[in-house]
Image: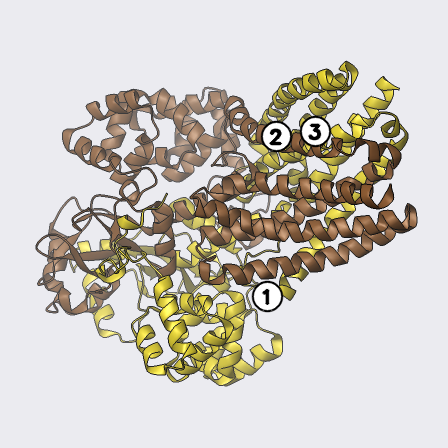
Chain colours: A yellow, B brown
Amino acid sequence: MRDDDDIQGRDGETATAAGEAEALYGVSDELVRRVADALDEGDAPTARMLVAELHAADIADLLERLSGEERRALVELQRDGFDPEILPHLGGNVRDQVIAQLGPRALAEALSELDSDDAIYLIEDLDDDIQAALLAAVPPATRRALEESLAYPEYSAGRLMQRDLIAMPAFWTVGRAIDFLRETPDLPEEFYEIFVVDPRHKPIGSVPLARMLRHPRKVLLRDIMDRDVDAIAAATDQEEVARLFRHYSLASAPVVDDQGRLIGVITFDDVVDVIQEEAEEDMALMAGVGSEVDVNAGLVSVVRQRIAWLGVNLGTALMVSSVISLFEATIEQIVALAVLMPIVASMGGNAGTQTLTVAVRALALKELTPSNAMRILTREVGVGTINGLVFGIAVGAVAAVIFDPFIGGVLFCALLANLVTAGLAGMLIPLALDRLKVDPAVSAGVFLTAVTDVVGFFAFLGLAQLVLL
Amino acid sequence: MRDDDDIQGRDGETATAAGEAEALYGVSDELVRRVADALDEGDAPTARMLVAELHAADIADLLERLSGEERRALVELQRDGFDPEILPHLGGNVRDQVIAQLGPRALAEALSELDSDDAIYLIEDLDDDIQAALLAAVPPATRRALEESLAYPEYSAGRLMQRDLIAMPAFWTVGRAIDFLRETPDLPEEFYEIFVVDPRHKPIGSVPLARMLRHPRKVLLRDIMDRDVDAIAAATDQEEVARLFRHYSLASAPVVDDQGRLIGVITFDDVVDVIQEEAEEDMALMAGVGSEVDVNAGLVSVVRQRIAWLGVNLGTALMVSSVISLFEATIEQIVALAVLMPIVASMGGNAGTQTLTVAVRALALKELTPSNAMRILTREVGVGTINGLVFGIAVGAVAAVIFDPFIGGVLFCALLANLVTAGLAGMLIPLALDRLKVDPAVSAGVFLTAVTDVVGFFAFLGLAQLVLL
C-alpha cells in the first residue's frame, strides 16, 4: 500500500494546498490539468511557463496524458526548441504522432543531437523509405554511426549500445587518465567505468570510476583494473545481455565486434528497459495481446493484435465442441453431465496455467535446465495428483449427494485425471516448444487449453457413458 | 532466436571442444557435470579447484543446479572460507537449506561482512526468534544498523538501501573531495555519485563521479552539483522507487529519514531486482501461483501456494454450474446447446483476459490514470464490439448451417454480448479493485472469469429458451 505522505517531492517541493505531497516522479494530475486548460484556452505563455523547467522524461509523460489535440498544440508551441531527449521517453503510439508532426527535418536534427543508442531506438522501427530519407538528412558522421548500428540484428547488443565511450591503454597512470578526462571536450556526459584496451583496441580490463578516484595519481591503470571483462559480442540477444547485467550487477559492459575490438558500451539504464520489456512481453504474449502492452494504442491496432489470438482460441473451442458432440446422446439422457462438465475443464485449465506460468518464466530466466527438468516435472505431477485428489473428493462427494453416487465417482476420476494431465502438459508443452526454438510464451497457452479441455470433457463424458449407461 | 556462436565467453574463453561457445555468464552444463562428478566420487581437491575462481553469483548458480546431496557436500567443503556474497544470489528455497546447514554462527559472521542491504535481504524473512538469535550474535554496530533497517516496512526504500555512503559539504573543492576519497579507508567499494549535504545532513545536491573527474581540483562541489535531488523517504514502496529510477535513468539516489536527513543510498542494481520481481509478481499473481515464481520450490509449498487459487476458481465453476442447471430442461430438449455453450464462455474469457492484462500492467506502471481511463474504456468496448461482430457472424453462420438458423442467431447475439461484457469487465474490475486499494493482479482474474462465464452461459441458454422453446 502506498502512502503519499511518505513521499517527498522532487526538488523538495512542499505539500500542495490539498495536503497531498507531490509524487516522487513524473507530473501530477494537477499539472496535467493546468497545462491542458492553458492549451485549451490558447494561452501559450502559461503553457510554456508550466513546462519550462520539466525534465524531458516528465514532458514525455505529460504529452502522453494530454488529449490528441492538446498534444499537437503543445508540440507546436515547442517546435523551435523541442528537446530531442523527449522522444525516446514517449510510448510507441504517441511517439509516432509527435514524430509525424515534427517532420523529417526536425527529426534529423534530433538524431544528430541524441546519444547513438537513443537515435537508433527512434529510427529502427520506421519504414525503410522514411528511414533512408532521414539518414540522408543527417550529418555524414552520424549517418555512418547509425548505419553501422542498424546493420546489427534487432534486439541485439549492437542496437542497444552507445558508441561514445572512454578507452585508455593499460600503461597510463591514474593521473594521466584524470588529466585526459579534464582536458578532452566532447566526452559522453555519463559513464561509470574506463575501459582499458590493448594496441588492437581489444578490451583487456576496466576501472570503475570509484576505484580510479581512490588511487594516487602515479598508479598504473593496469594495476587496478578488473581483468575479467564481460565483453559482449555485438550480435548477442538483448535478453542475454540483460541476464548478464543482472547476474553480475554490472553498471556497464563493453561491446566488441567480430574481431573482438571495442566498439560500444551498454549501460545499466538500457538494460533496465530491456528487463521491464522482456518480463512484460512474456505476460503479454501469454495473454495474447501482442508482444507489447501499450495502453494508449489505437482501436485498429488493438483489434489487429487481439483477433488472431481469439481466432486460435476459437479453433480450440470448436475442437472442444466436437468432443462434446460425440456424447450428445449421453447428455440427452443425463443432463446433469452438461451442468457439471465445465467444472472439470475449468479446473484443469487453471491448474495447467499455474504450471505453465512457472515453466515459461523459468525458461525465460534460464532456470529450467536439463539438469533440473525431470525433478520439476515429477514435482508438478505430484502437485497435480494431490490437487486432483483434494478437489476430486470434495466435488465428487457434493455431486454424489446432489445427483447420484455414480456421477460423483465419475467426476472424481475425471478431475484427478485432468489435474495430473494439467501438470504434465503444463511442463512438457513449454519444454517441447523451447526445444523446437518456438517462444513458449506465445503458443504454449493454446496447446495447453486444448489439452486440458479435450482431456477434461473426454474423460468426464466418456467415463459417464461407460459407467452410467 | 539466440545464436550461441554469437556469444563471446567470459574472460574471452574460446569455443569448447564441442564447437559451442561458452555462455555469456553463469556456469556451463559441462562445469556443473564435472563438479557433480567430483562430489559424487568424494574427490574434494578437484571440486575445490573447479569452483576456486568462480564469481559468487556463479557459485550460487552452481549450488542451485546441483542435487540436494551434492549441494550439501559442496557447502561442507567450503565451510571454512564460505563467501558470504554467495548467499544473496541464492533463490529462496536453496538459500534456506544452505543457511540451515551453515548454522547461526557462520551466518552471523556473514552478516557483518555483507553490505547492509544484502544482510537485510538475508534476514528479513527469517522467523522472529531465529532473527533475534542472529542479531544477538553480530557485533553491536552491525546489529544497530540492521535493527534500524528492519524497523522500516517490508518492500520499502529503507529495506532496500545500503547505509554506507559518501556525503560531503558543498564548500569542499573537487581536489579536497578526491583527497578524502584517496585517504579514507573503509569506504564502500562501489559508488556512482557523491551526495552533497547541508550542515543538518540533508541532501542538497549530488555530483556524479564522471563529472567530478572532469573538473579541475579547485572547483567547488556546489558549482557542479545537480540540484534536483530525488530524495526518497525511507518508507516509500520499492515499486515507487523502481519507477523513479526507471523514469529518470538514475544510477543511485539518496534515502532520507522523517527529518529529511540522509541515511542511505539505493543503487541501480537493487532496483533491477525490484523491476524483475514486480513484473514477475503480477504475472505470478494473475496465474495464481503465489507472489513469486521459484522454479525450485518444494512440493508442499507449491501445493499450498496453488490450492487456494484453485479453490477460488472452483467457486466460480460451481456458480457457472448453477447457472447451467437453471436451463436443464432447455438443454434436455436441444442438446446442441450443451455442445455450443463452451464456445461462448471461452471466447469471453479469453477476450476479457486480454483487456485485463493490459489494464493490470498499465495500473502497475501508473499509465492508466483518471485522465485516460474513459478513453481506454471506450476503446476496449469498441474492440469487444468489433470482435463480437466478427466471431459472432462467423460462428453463428456455421451453427446456422450445421444445426438451425435460430441456434445460429442465438449464438451470434450471445457472443456479441459476451465480448462487449468482456471488454467492459476487463477494464472496470481492475479499476474498481485499484480504487479499493486491492492489487488487481491478485483478484481481478477470478471476478472476470466469473462475469464472462456467467454472462456467457446465461445469455446463450437464456436467449435459447426465449427464442427456441
Tag 3 subunit: A
Q: Percent from the top left, x then y, of residue A277? A: 50, 54
Q: Separation of disc 2 and disc 1 at Cα? A: 36 Å
In which quadrant of the rendered image does the C terminus of chain A lie? top right
Q: Residue at x 67, y 27 (%)?
A: A419
Q: Is B12 above or below relative to B18? A: below
Q: Residue at x 35, y 46 (%)?
A: A2
Of residues A334 and B23, the one drawn nearer to the viewer in this rendering = A334
Q: What number is the disc on residue A346?
A: none
On screen, residue B450 versus residue A88, left or right, reads right
Q: What number is the disc on residue B315?
A: 2
Of residues A160 and A166, the one drawn nearer to the viewer in this rendering = A160
Of residues B235 and A338, the one drawn nearer to the viewer in this rendering = A338
Q: Which amino acid, mark 3? A: Thr
Residue position for label 1: A298
Q: Which amino acid, mark 2? A: Gly
Q: Percent from the top left, x then y, of residue B420? A: 66, 53
Q: Separation of disc 1 and disc 3 at Cα? A: 40 Å
Q: What number is the disc on residue A421?
A: 3
